[in-house]
Each structure stands twice: as structure tokens, then as C-alpha cells.
Image (cartoon, rainbow, N blue to C red):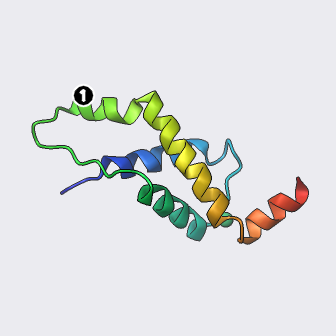
């Protein structure tokens, strides 16, 4: 089965920052946030010749993580601008 490694990375980074940054916990928002981020990131598919080590290195690359995090943050602003959770959070700030 083909796997988009950028998608795996977006999922990993999202679960890492979800609680840390108090991101909205609505599953509808979560899907939209990931979708928008992925639309703004290049898909990455590895060939059969690529080793597991290289795939792992891709996922832990710090610079790439920062890029993914930036895209996720932008997506949160778009998606949760209108949702209930976002409204409540804004009001309390
Ligand atoms: Zn939301």
C-alpha cells in the first residue's frame, strides 16, 4: 500500500502539539486542520529502494517538523476561527 509520509508526519506532529498548544479537540476540526495543512505541503512517497532508516530520518527531521507545525498553526487559524471552541478560547484571552 502506498503511504504519503507527509501525512504520517502531519499526524505525528499534530498529536504532539494538540495538548501543548490547547488546539481545538473537535474531530471535525481536527480533520479539516490536517487536510488544509496537507494541501499546503508536498506529498512524499518513498520508493521500494529507500531504507527504513531513511524513512525514519525523514519523520524526525527537525527543520521539516517546524515547517509542518507552521502549516498546522495556519490551518488552525482558518478552521477554528468559526468553531465553538475557537470562539470560546478567543473570548477568554
Ligand atoms: Zn475547532
Question: Can you name the residue that lies furthest to the right here?
Answer: 92
How many neighbours does mark 1 have within 10 angstroms: few (below 14), some (14-19), or many (20 or more)? few
Rendered-image quarter of ligand 1: bottom right
Element under disc 1: helix
Foreground residue among 68 and 22: 68
| Residue 31: x %, y % from top left | 51, 65
Q: Is mark 1 within 8 Å of ligand 1?
A: no
In the shown orientation, is residue 15 left or right of residue 59? right
The answer to whether any part of residue 64 appears in the image is yes
Report the residue marked by disc 1.
53
The answer to whether any part of residue 15 appears in the image is no
| Residue 92: x %, y % from top left | 89, 57
The part of the image, by quadrant, that contains residue 2 is: bottom left
| Tag count | 1
Q: Is residue 28 above or below residue 65?
A: below
Quadrant where the image shows the N terminus: bottom left
Q: Residue at x 75, y 63 (%)?
A: 86
Q: Residue at x 75, y 71 (%)?
A: 84
Q: Residue at x 32, y 52 (%)?
A: 43
Q: Residue at x 46, y 44 (%)?
A: 12
Question: Can you name the residue that lies furthest to the left here?
Answer: 49
In the shown orientation, is residue 40 left or right of residue 1? right
Q: Is residue 21 above or below residue 60?
A: below
Foreground residue among 20 and 49: 49
The part of the image, by quadrant, that contains residue 53 is: top left
| Residue 26: x %, y % from top left | 63, 66
Amino acid at each position: 500500500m502506498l503511504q504519503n509520509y507527509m501525512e504520517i508526519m502531519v499526524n505525528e506532529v499534530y498529536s504532539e502539539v494538540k495538548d501543548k498548544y490547547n488546539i481545538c479537540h473537535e474531530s471535525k476540526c481536527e480533520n479539516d486542520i490536517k487536510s488544509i495543512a496537507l494541501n499546503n505541503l508536498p506529498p512524499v512517497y518513498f520508493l521500494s529502494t529507500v531504507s527504513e532508516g531513511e524513512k525514519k530520518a525523514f519523520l524526525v527531521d527537525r527543520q521539516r517538523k517546524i515547517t509542518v507545525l507552521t502549516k498546522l498553526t495556519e490551518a488552525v487559524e482558518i478552521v477554528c476561527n468559526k468553531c465553538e471552541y475557537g470562539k470560546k478560547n478567543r473570548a477568554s484571552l
